[in-house]
Image (tube, rainbow, N blue to C red):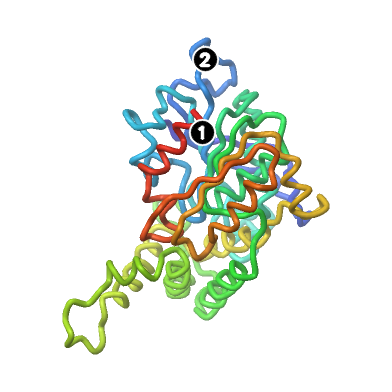
Amino acid sequence: MEKRYFLHKEEFVLESREIFKELKICYHISREWNESGEQSEMQRRKKVVWITHALTANSNPCEWWSELVGEGKFLDPRKYTIVCANLIGSCYGSTSPLSINPETGKPYLLKFPKTTVRDIVATLDLLREKLGIKEIDLLIGGSVGGFQAIEWSISRRDIIKNVALLACNARITPWGNAFNESQRMALFADPTLEQQDFSIKKGEIVARGGAKGLAAARSIALISYRSYQGYNKSQYETSNEIIWNHKAASYQQYQGQKLVKRFDAYSYLSMINLTDSHNIGRGRGGVDTALNMINANVVCVGIDSDILFPTEEQKYIASHVRKGSYREITSLYGHDGFLLEWKQIETILKEIL
C-alpha cells in the first residue's frame, strides 16, 4: 500500500461551526490506484475495502493489523482496493493540533477545534469522492473505527454495501464518558500541557508538553482495553515474596511511555474529545430510527471479555438494523481482541467477501 496526501483547499465547516481554511488528509491505498480518480479496468473489477482506524492508530493497517492486511494476507491490496485514512486531529499526517493555525502562525495545540465523528466521516467522504470511488463493498472498523463506519453507513447509505462493526456501539455510554474524563483529568494534571511548548526538529513540529499526563492517561485507558482474566494471566507473579514493584505496575509504566514515544498529548486530547461526540441518534430522532436508516448488510462483532463495549451493545445494533447479524469472538485480551484475534476476524470476513 502507498502513503499519499489529499489537500482539500476549500473551507471545511465543522459541526461546532469552526472553520478550517483547508484540510490535509493522510491516507494509504493499494499501489495501482490512480490519484486522478480515473480507474483502469483492473481497478473497476476489484472490490473496495475501506478500513476506518481506531483511536491512536494510523492510516497504514499493514502495520497495526499486520496479520490480516498486506500482500499474501487475507485482505491483500493486490486483490482488493484497500483504503484507510488518518483521522483529522491525529498526529499521523492529517491536519492536527500540531498543524499551523493560520490565525496565529503557530501550532494549534490546545486551540485545535473539537471535531465530531460526523466531521471525520465528512472528510472521509471528501477523500472517497476525490478518488472516484462510487461504491464501498466492505467498510470495516473497530472501536472508534466502528464509530466512523456506522456513522458513514447512515450518512451515505447509498454507497456502502456491507459493513463490519467490531467492538463498538451506536452511541457513547456514560461508562465510556467516565473513562474519557478520567483521561482528560490526567492530561490536565500535567502542568506542562497548558504551557504549550513546542520545538521544530528536522522541519517537523514537536510538542513538548503533557508527556507525563499522556502516559497516565494511557494507563487508565489500557485498563478498559484489557480484561481481568488477561491481566491475571499475563502479569501474574510467580513469586510469593513480592511486596512492591509488581509486574502489572511496570507494564502500565511501559505502555504509558510507549505511547509517549509515538503520540502527543494534544492529539490524544483531540481523539478522546472526538470519542465523546459519538451518537448516531443525534438529530435523527434517536438511535433506533438512525439504525433503521442503514441499507447495508451489517455484521456486528463482539468480544466476550470486552468491558469497554460489552457484547450487548453489538447485539443491540444487529437486532435493530434492517439486515444485521451478530458474531462473537473469544479472547483473553478484552477490547483489544479486535486487533489481536485476527484469525477469528478473518473467518468472519470470509463470510462477507
Which of the two discs, 1 and 2, labels the residue nearer the N terminus? 2
Nearer to the camera, 33 or 78: 78
Residue wearing tag 1: 83
Residue 25, position in %: x, y? Answer: 57, 41
Looking at the picture, how far across and down is residue 193, in whole percent? 53, 73
Q: Quadrant of residue 215?
A: bottom left
Label 1 residue SS: strand
Q: Is residue 159 above or below residue 339?
A: above
- Does 35 sit above or below residue 54? above
Residue 60 sits in quarter: top left
Question: Residue at image x 56%, y 65%?
Answer: 269
> Seen in the image, is 84 located left or right of residue 181?
left
Residue type at mark 1 is Val
Residue at the disc numbered 2: 45
Label 2 crowd (10 A; few <14 / some 14-19 / many >=20): few
**Nearest the eye: 239 or 245:** 239
Please state which of the two labelled residues, at mark 1 or mark 2, is closer to the viewer. 2
Residue drawn where x is 71% and y is 46% of the image: 21
Category of crowding for the residue at label 1, using alpha-carbon neighbours closer than 10 angstroms: few (below 14), some (14–19), many (at least 20): many
